[in-house]
Image (cartoon, rainbow, N blue to C red):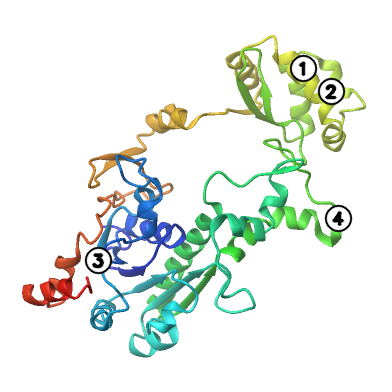
Amino acid sequence: MRPLDGIKVITLEHAIAAPFCTRQLADLGARVIKVERPGTGDFARGYDERVEGLASHFVWTNRSKESLSLDVKQPEAGKILDALLADADVLVQNLAPGAADRLGLGYGTLSKQYPKLIVCDISGYGADGPYRDKKAYDLLIQSESGFLSITGSPGEPAKAGCSIADIAAGMYAYSNILSALILRGRTGKGCRIDVSMLESMVEWMGYPLYYAIGNQNPPALSGASHATIYPYGPFLAGDGKTVMLGLQNEREWKVFCERVLEQPSLATDSRFDANSKRSGSRDVLRELIVAAFSKLTAAEVVQRLDAAGIANAQMNTLADVWAHPQLESRDRWREVGTSAGLIPALLPPGMPNGFEPRMDPVPALGEHTDAILRELGYEPSQIQALREAGTI
């Protein structure tokens, strides 16, 4: 038995934020019916063809769902949506601002007909305010939230390499839906959840915001190094490979000097005897560290760091991560089906023990349309008529 067995989710979604949310609900056993535009579907299906002809974003965020192709603007579509919502627990949507209301799918309308329904609206900026109708994509929210101002190197701001704003919004949608289901179990009533990408990212920006409160200087752009703690970041070894390491306190600094650099006098050097001094003198200190590491391979540096109890990591490529020995040892990979065959998929992190997460195939566009309509009572001739009319 999975935690969300018996929970039915209807989702009008595209791109990443909402699909990532609902895929995690499916992981926990929820039945997720994904409503897609006939012919094209979720536009994330066309982002690339890297996974045996399928899009990398799409296969990541859409396994274990049922795909219903439906043109929601067609007259008959409203009847189908009503039938789907009649016994649904959750509706998730990240349509353009105002689109759900125009379709009669706003919480104000739905709550009267389906008082137990939980409605989760995901948008760029929220349901009101001067930015409500502004288009919002992941990179734009990274910029608007201040994330780009603290990421990268001096003069070279950099975006996150994955869709961090979408992921943040998807995670808050997911966790708040779980909370709403618990609350409904106590009150018997549904509710509305209003998740904004901007607010999700600004929450994740808490540390740099507080660091710069009152118009103080923001954290310096420092590439892959920590902005305010040093040494904490990438360092080149003698074989040309990079080692990532991090020191958190003065005890570790002393051990690092003695056992890794084998230069104990540096521990009490007045230029480096406090983190603020090390951070302020990072260029000089970096040269000293790289000079010491130049006599060693990356593996030898890691060996010394491990022996000294200093936190470290390899700067892995994506190919390295696919073959990561820790993930392999913990048996974290499974296979899921797609229209192009089996692909590997990571087990969802942090699942409670006692059940296997649901990891069913990634649906082809409209794959479950006929089955869902038959379940709603439509006859084959009616389904064919809907298809001929372009409704499905």
> Residue 70: x percent and y percent?
26, 71
Local SS, label 1? helix
Task: Using the image, tell me which numbered label, if any, was put on residue 216.
Answer: 4
Q: Is residue 338 left or right of residue 206?
A: left
Q: Residue at x 29, y 39 (%)?
A: 52
Which kind of residue does numbered mark 3 sit on?
A: Leu
Of labels 3 and 4, earlier in sequence is 3
Q: Which residue is identified by label 2?
A: 267
Where does the N terminus fall, quadrant-wise? bottom left
* Cα gap from disc 1 to disc 4, whole angstroms: 36 Å
Please, is residue 368 above or below residue 164 in the view? below
Q: Is residue 240 left or right of residue 348?
A: right
Which kind of residue does numbered mark 2 sit on?
A: Ala
Q: Residue 43 sits in which quadrant?
A: bottom left
Which kind of residue does numbered mark 1 sit on?
A: Glu
Q: Label 2: few (<14), some or many (≥20) within 10 Å? A: many
Of labels 2 and 3, earlier in sequence is 3
For the residues bearing labels 1 and 2, Cβ distance under 8 angstroms: yes
Task: Give the camera-side residue of 240 and 46.
Answer: 46
Q: Is residue 190 left or right of residue 274?
A: left
For the residues bearing labels 3 and 4, Cβ distance under 8 angstroms: no
Task: Using the image, tell me which numbered label, if any, was put on residue 258.
Answer: 1
Of labels 3 and 1, earlier in sequence is 3
Q: Residue at x 80, y 51 (%)?
A: 218
Q: Label 3: few (<14), some or many (≥20) within 10 Å? A: many
Local SS, label 4? loop
> Residue 34: x percent and y percent?
30, 65
Local SS, label 2? helix
Of labels 2 and 4, earlier in sequence is 4
Q: Which residue is identified by label 3?
A: 68
Of labels 1 and 4, earlier in sequence is 4
